[in-house]
Amino acid sequence: MSDTASHTEGVQSEEALLLRAKTDPQGVAVIYDLYADKIYGFLLKRCGHKETAEDLVSKVFMKFIENLPGIEWQDVSIGAYLYRAATNALTDHWRSAKVRLDVEVDENWDPASTIDQPAWHAELSLERDKLAEIIKSMSPRDQQILDLKFFAGLEPEEIAKLIDITPNHASVLVYRALGRLRTKYHATYVRQS
């Protein structure tokens, strides 16, 4: 199946899921099961504090449930709405705290993986640490774009809706941020090897 066909099929099933959630609480539970861990990981990476991330996930889903009757399908995944709500909740949290600390990700949190090979996990862990260090040195905009694209797994159309730009602009921002990440990675780690 082509990527376009699978994306179209995924969008249609998400639209059906949103419609189901409006009339059936079990639909909300399915959405929660699909997105809660992803939203938690996204928030944990951005705030670095487990309890805060957990509280914010609760707020995101409470807001989703409160606004569900008025949410109209806009041809993007439910995740796009949830990541926007998560970003807004985190912004509100930082405003209320009036302090933004340097983020240290809880090293014990690791998203579930379908690969069971220890050597692969060790290599992934080393590369993750290298990339995390480089990403922390990048501009806040580059960090946001890379988080949304690779950590949240959003498509350019979804990123565009979240940060209020065109999909083409979102694609360009992803491309440029990746270029800067690649350049810094090579300058830091490849030349040292």
Image: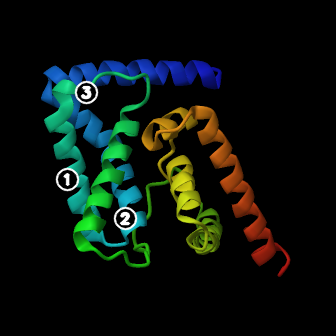
Residue at x-position 46% and y-position 44%: 163
Q: Kindly report the distance in space between the C-alpha atoms of the residues bearing marks 2 and 3.
A: 26 Å
**Mark 1 and mark 2 residues within 8 Å of each other at the beta carbon:** no
Residue at x-position 78% and y-position 65%: 183
Instruction: Find residue 137 and report its horizontal and vertical position in percent.
Output: 60, 74
Instruction: Find residue 67 and report its horizontal and vertical position in percent.
Output: 18, 34
SS for dot 3:
loop
User: Residue type at mark 3?
Assistant: Ile
Q: Is residue 178 visible?
A: yes
SS for dot 1:
helix
Q: Circle 1 sits on which residue?
A: 58
Q: Kindly report the distance in space between the C-alpha atoms of the residues bearing marks 1 and 2.
A: 13 Å
Q: Which mark is residue 173?
A: none
User: Which of the two labelled residues, at mark 2 and mark 3, occupies the earlier sequence position?
Assistant: 2
Closer to the camera in the image, 4 or 172: 172
Closer to the camera in the image, 95 or 7: 95
Q: Is residue 115 visible?
A: no
- Mark 3 surroundings: few (<14), some (14-19) or many (≥20) residues within 10 A: some
Q: Is 88 left, or right, of 122 in this rendering?
A: left
User: Which of the two labelled residues, at mark 1 and mark 3, occupies the earlier sequence position?
Assistant: 1
Q: Which mark is residue 71?
A: 3
35 relative to 93, above or below: above
Q: Is 71 left, or right, of 121 in this rendering?
A: left
- Name the residue at the bottom extreme: 192
User: Residue type at mark 1?
Assistant: Ser
**Residue 17 lies in quadrant:** top left
SS for dot 2:
helix
Q: Circle 2 sits on which residue?
A: 44
Instruction: Find residue 83 and report its horizontal and vertical position in percent.
Output: 38, 46
Q: Quadrant of the N terminus?
A: top right
Residue at x-position 44% and y-position 64%: 110
